[in-house]
Structure formats: C-alpha cells, structure tokens
C-alpha cells in the first residue's frame, strides 16, 4: 500500500485523537483548578480565624479550659520529642535495610517477598499502626502511654517509606562508580562505605525528612494509643506522658466554646508552618543535589 493511502487512512484517527486530547487536558486542568481553589479557600479561612489568636504566649502557655489562656507548649515539645526519637529509631534501621537489600541481599524469592511486603506496608492506613502500637508497645511491653511508645509507633509508620526512599537513592548511584572502585582494588564494604552511601545521602535525607513530616501531622496513631490532650508539663523523659500538636488541635475543635475554633485554627497554622518548613528543607536538598550532579 502506498504511503499516501496510509496517510489518508490514519488522518481521521489523528484528528479524533487530537480532539480527545484537548478534552482530557481541559478536564485535568479543571480538576487541578478545583483542587487548588479548595486548598486556597481552606488556608485563607484558617488564616482568617487563627491569625488573631497567634501570639508569643500561645506558643509558650499550656492548654487551658479558657480559650484566652490556652497555648501549645506541651504539644509542641511533645511533637519534638516524638519526631526526634522517631528519627533516631527509623534512620539507622531504614538506611541499613535499604543498603542490605540493594547491595548485599541475594536476588531470590525471599528477597522479592520482603520487597513486596515493604511496598505494601507503606500503603497501610496509619490507624492500623496505631492499633499495633497500642497492642505491642503500650500493653504487651508495658511501656504505657509514654513518649517512647508513641515514637516507636511512629517509627513503624514511616519505616517503610524511609526504606523505599533510601533504596531509590542508592539505586541512583551510577554502577560505573562502583566498577571504578572495584577496579582500584576496593572491597565490597569499602565501595558501599566510601562510594555508595556518601553519594546517596542527599536522596536519603530528602526521603527521611518527608517521612518525618508525615509523622508530624499524623493524629490517628496517637489517638489509638490515647495520647493525652490536656497536659500542663513538658516531657523530660522518654517514659513521660505526652501530647502532640494534631491531638491538641483535635481536642480544641471538639470543644463547644466558640473561642476554641480560633485557637484550633491558630494551632493548624503552627502545624502548617512546621510541615512547610520540613518540606522546604527536603526540596532545597533535592535541588542542590540536582545542580551538583549536572555540574
């Protein structure tokens, strides 16, 4: 068949595909605009309600039954404790597991099962981890409703994400760098220690920060282990009682007094600032790493 005949046959299909392409493009753009509009309206309303309640005393005072005297000090320090211990537990285990799976683990059926289960665990709802933490850490190991139990529960939540992100960072290291090190007589451990891990640290840090930022905003696991909502002291020990910012905000929203609506909105603003800061740090690390690799 001549080329002209083929062109005449497929030209109508091409025109139809272009029309459908424009339609789907318009629908997708409309979905994006609707989502962004809803987000902007929500953020503007939170700022409008919460901005008048923001003050230095709001950050340094303890919760109170009176909106004018309520603050987030115990919740802020509780979140710092939780995130600090979560990072301390998660980063060594997650990075170590990623290094083993990428560099040392044999490619067999057992490794494939482990990889599939890690991917599945990353999509498990957070409330399931909360119930697991309640059963294992709070009750079975008798840690009580302490900072340590909360941090271990959050570690279970973000560990699969850290492993997956670390594996992707390790996988992005060019194989030629490994081969060059082997050519110079380096051992497997030396290649991993001196070549693979240092080059993958920016990607590992980015994934870890994003995982921890998810842990900052999670309320369901903390509700499951019944973190306190009215705490008038700052935790000083891993076995102390605690509360976190999402739980404190949830408690204020559930109160009938109208003033607590503004207090809750102010707490949401503080939480958003923390989350945006952590995500901005992750984006900065990623962009800086990309510029270095392009150079």
Image (tube, grey):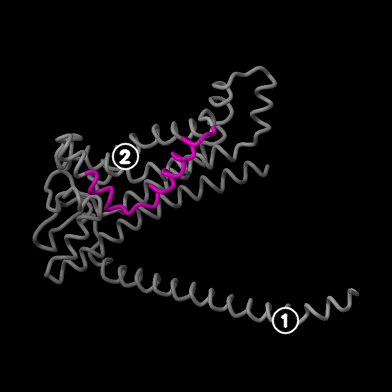
User: Which portion, as a residue range, is magenta?
Assistant: 107-133
Mark 1, secondary structure of its residue = helix
Task: Give the side of residue 68 with respect to residue 30, left or right.
Answer: left
Q: Based on the picture, tell me whether residue 141 belongs to the magenta stretch.
A: no
In which quadrant is the N terminus drawn?
bottom right
| Position of residue 189 measured from the top left corner of the image (x, y, whole percent) | 54, 21
Q: Which residue is at the front of the view, 169 or 130?
A: 130
Q: On residue 7, which mark appears?
A: none
Q: Residue 259's x, y, as percent?
A: 15, 69
**Cα gap from disc 1 to disc 2, whole angstroms:** 55 Å
267 in relation to 108, above or below = below
Tell whether position 112 is magenta.
yes
Residue 120 drawn at (x, y percent): 41, 49
Q: Is residue 88 left or right of residue 267?
A: right
Q: Would you call the spot at circle 1 few (<14 residues within 10 Å), some (14-19), or many (20 or more)?
A: few
Residue at x 30%, y 71% (from the top left corner):
48
Front residue of 101/230: it is: 101
Marking on residue 86: 2
Identify the residue position indicated by label 1 in the image.
Answer: 15
Q: Earlier in the sequence, mark 1 or mark 2?
A: 1
The residue located at (53%, 47%) in the rendering is 286
For label 2, count other residues whose C-alpha is less than 10 Å away and answer few (under 14), some (14-19) or many (20+). many
Q: Tell me which residue sits at (23%, 53%) in the image.
A: 59
Q: Is residue 174 above or below residue 183?
A: below
Q: Main secondary structure of the magenta part?
A: helix
């Amino acid at each position: 068949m001549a080329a002209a005949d083929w062109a005449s046959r497929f030209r109508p299909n091409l025109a139809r595909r272009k029309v459908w392409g424009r339609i789907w493009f318009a629908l997708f753009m409309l979905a994006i605009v609707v989502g962004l509009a809803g987000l902007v309206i929500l953020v503007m309303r939170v700022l409008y309600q919460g901005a008048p309640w923001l003050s230095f005393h709001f950050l340094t005072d303890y919760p109170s039954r009176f909106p004018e005297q309520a603050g987030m000090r115990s919740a802020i320090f509780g979140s710092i404790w939780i995130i600090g211990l979560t990072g301390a537990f998660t980063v060594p285990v997650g990075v170590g597991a990623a290094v083993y799976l990428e560099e040392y683990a044999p490619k067999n059926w057992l490794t494939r099962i482990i990889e599939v289960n890690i991917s599945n665990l990353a999509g498990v709802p957070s409330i399931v981890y909360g119930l697991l933490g309640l059963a294992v850490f709070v009750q079975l190991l008798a840690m009580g409703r302490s900072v340590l139990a909360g941090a271990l529960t959050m570690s279970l939540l973000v560990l699969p994400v850290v492993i997956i992100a670390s594996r992707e960072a390790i996988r992005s290291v060019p194989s030629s760098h490994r081969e060059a090190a082997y050519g110079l007589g380096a051992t497997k451990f030396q290649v991993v220690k001196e070549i693979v891990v240092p080059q993958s640290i920016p990607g590992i840090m980015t994934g870890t920060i994003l995982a921890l930022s998810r842990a900052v905003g999670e309320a369901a696991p903390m509700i499951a282990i019944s973190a306190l909502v009215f705490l008038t002291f700052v935790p000083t020990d891993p076995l102390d009682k605690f509360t976190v910012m999402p739980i404190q905000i949830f408690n204020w929203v559930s109160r009938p007094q109208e003033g607590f609506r503004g207090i809750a909105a102010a707490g949401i603003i503080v939480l958003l600032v923390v989350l945006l800061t952590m995500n901005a740090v992750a984006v900065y690390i990623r962009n800086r790493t990309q510029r270095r690799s392009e150079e």
